[in-house]
Amino acid sequence: MTGKTASDPDPQRAQRADAQRNRARILDAARTVVDEQGTQASLRDIARRAGVGMGTFYRHFPTRDALLQTLLCQGFDRLSVKADSLAAAAAPEEALMEWLRDFTAGSTAYRGLAASMMTTLSDESSPLHASCLAMREAGARLLKRAQDAGRIRADVDGTDLFALVNAVSWIAEQAPSVAARREHLFSLVMDGLTRRP
């Protein structure tokens, strides 16, 4: 009999599972290292923290752009899912504020993206563009919900919103002396967006 049994596991399946675990470990380590070091983070450091060799690293992510694209897609997708969860569980203004706070906290790690990545981000046929668009649409839905509830000014659109919160992140990154005041700056932006009676 040539069939597989419980004591005769499929080596290809075991290899695939091992490869998936390695990929997940690389991405977990990469998130941490990119948060610490930015987009020019040491790939060697990422591999070391993931507990894999450089050969294994490059089999999964042959270029820095491939790794960053995956991290960005995952981040955008997570924010899209979070927007839906918040819309179902929190009051409109609180949902928008919590989502924007999360968006702002994650955006600084990806400053200084290479021109090639920015091109991919703006390429309407790329998966990265699709993930980014879905994330922005999710944020816009939270904005509209807060506006419909009369909590946010009606003259604010998604472009205004993302420009303002990105500005807070950029200022905190460029001027470390004000980084500790990021939350205060964020509160000032939200105060300016709030609809007055």
Image: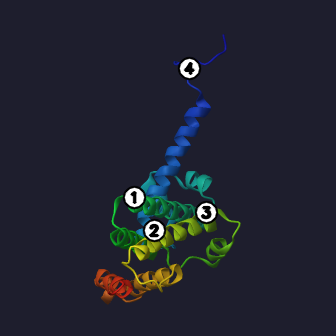
Mark 4, Cα crowd under 10 Å, few <14 / some 14-19 / many 20+, is few
Q: Quadrant of the C terminus?
A: bottom left
Mark 2, Cα crowd under 10 Å, few <14 / some 14-19 / many 20+, is many
At label 3, which amino acid type do we have? Ala
The residue that disc 2 covers is: 34
At label 2, which amino acid type do we have? Val
Q: Quadrant location of residue 174? A: bottom left
Q: Choose the circle earlier in sequence order: 2 or 4.
A: 4
Q: CA distance from mark 1 to mark 2?
A: 31 Å
Q: Secondary structure at mark 4?
A: loop
Residue under the image location 62 percent in, 72 percent down: 121
Percent across and percent down for residue 153 are 41, 84
Q: Secondary structure at mark 2?
A: helix
Q: Is residue 6 visible?
A: yes
Q: Choose the circle earlier in sequence order: 3 or 4.
A: 4
Looking at the image, is 126 positioned above or below residue 150?
above
For the residues bearing labels 1 and 2, Cβ distance under 8 angstroms? no
The residue that disc 4 covers is: 8
Foreground label between 3 and 1: 1
Q: Which mark is residue 66?
A: 3
Left or right: where 107 falls relative to 186: right
Q: CA distance from mark 4 to mark 1?
A: 47 Å
Q: Quadrant location of residue 164? A: bottom left
Q: Secondary structure at mark 3?
A: helix
Q: Choose the circle earlier in sequence order: 3 or 2.
A: 2
At label 1, which amino acid type do we have? Ala
Q: Which mark is residue 88?
A: 1
Mark 3, Cα crowd under 10 Å, few <14 / some 14-19 / many 20+, is few
Percent across and percent down for residue 18 are 52, 40
Left or right: where 32 falls relative to 125: left
Looking at the image, is 157 positioned above or below residue 61?
below
